Image (cartoon, rainbow, N blue to C red):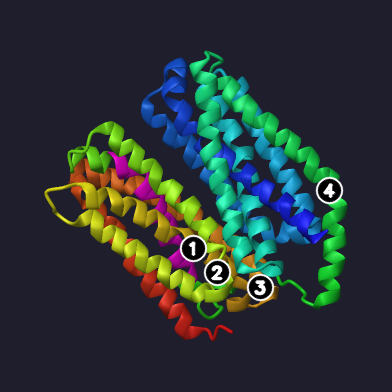
Amino acid sequence: MVSLLLAIIYIAFISLGLPDSLLGSAWPIMQGQLDVPLSYAGIITMIIAGGTIVSSLCADRVIRKLGTGLVTAISVALTAAGLMGFSLSTEFWMLCLLAIPYGLGAGAIDAALNNYVALHYSSRHMSWLHAFWGVGVTISPYIMSFCLTRNFGWEMGYRSVSLIQIVLTAVLFTTLPLWKKAAKVHTQEEEVIPKVLSVPQALKLKGASNVLIAFFCYCALESTAGLWASSYLVGHRGVDAETAARFAALFYIGITVGRVLNGFIADKLGDRAMIRTGILVMAAGVLLVALPLPTTLPCLIGLVVIGLGCAPVYPCIIHSTPVNFGKEHSQSLVGIQMASAYTGSTLMPPLFGLIAQYVHIGLYPLYLGIFTLVMLWMTEALNRKISIK
């Protein structure tokens, strides 16, 4: 039962990753057909991010009432409905409207499953869980590319992913009894009564502000590194566009592969060591990107190294939440951490875009370096404040 439920959770995380890269893959075509400026993609992503932040903050209360399994099933259904709506949209305002359930569903899945795995499974499963998210993110551009190259249109790309989500929704509703059986087992194993905390209450917990800032910085770094890698390589280092795109993709592949590999060592090293090692590897990668050498090879390798360094940080911070703040507070903290993460990934890449436009795109490694140093500072401060067993 436990193994089957874990498999379902893994599949649910693939579904979480599937929609994330669709808009970027399809927007060049969508933008022309909808007759809107190229920059309007940012409006859609901001609405989606707003929905994820709201649902992450509300996840604790909703999960207490409905349970993790039902919340996950409903959330996947919301994303499926949003994606199907995208495939039927003929006006930009329709995309904006449908981005609301799309975002609300994604945030709830993230908060619910991350906390569930953190409470009931080992650190290696948390790493593999996020590797499966990477699988979803990697698959969806190929689905969209297949539909576009065969003249099925971007609408069919969205519809195809929506149909996958609908099938998964049916699987999740069918397997709800598994969640109930697992809940009985967990209740017998330990008596933990979850406590719902508001944001001000959560911030009063020792180390909470440190972990929220660290999470903000991590997601700011990851999203900025991925979004602006090609532009930096082409515009500042003189790399050809094809090579730049290939190494920008390798950044994300590095994260996914890194999380698969981390799963084999996470339980042995522990979350604290994995987080510290990951940040130091990220710092080494940023340094390689910044080196003003006549050859661009170290810079290109640096992007892959940053991706490998990113791999353990997110899952290990989440997995350590019940230990750091108590199992009774973990769902509240995970939801607030998700909101902080989405805020960082939403606001910081556009900020660098302004810096690149009005100052210089060569500040890319410095920008990443600042987030890396603050992340290291915050996580080490958290370690000093909290005795981790």
Image x and y of residue 5, in percent: 77, 55
* Residue 129 higher or lower than 230, as above or below: below
Which residue is more in the foreground, 258 or 190?
Answer: 258
Do tag 2 and tag 1 residues touch (Cβ < 8 Å)?
A: yes
- As drawn, is 66 to the left or to the right of 321? right
Q: Is residue 215 magenta?
A: yes
Q: Main secondary structure of the magenta part?
A: helix
Name the quadrant containing residue 264. bottom right
Front of the two marks 3 and 2: 2
> Which residue has dot 1 on it?
312
Image x and y of residue 181, in percent: 87, 61
Query: Which element carries disc 3, helix, strand or loop?
Result: helix
Q: Earlier in the sequence, mark 3 or mark 2?
A: 2
Residue 329 has which mark? 3
Name the quadrant containing residue 35. top left
Q: Residues within 10 Å of mark 4 (few under 14, many from 20)?
A: some
Query: Which element carries disc 2, helix, strand or loop?
Result: helix
Q: CA distance from mark 2 to mark 4?
A: 29 Å
Q: Residues within 10 Å of mark 2 (few under 14, many from 20)?
A: many
Q: What range is drawn magenta here?
A: 211-230
Residue 266 has which mark? 2
* Residue 97 higher or lower than 190, as above or below: above
Identify which residue is drawn at 68% across, 46% down: 11
Q: Earlier in the sequence, mark 2 or mark 1?
A: 2
Q: CA distance from mark 4 to mark 3?
A: 27 Å
Do tag 2 and tag 4 residues touch (Cβ < 8 Å)?
A: no
Q: Earlier in the sequence, mark 2 or mark 4?
A: 4
Q: CA distance from mark 2 to mark 1?
A: 8 Å
> Which residue has dot 4 on it?
175
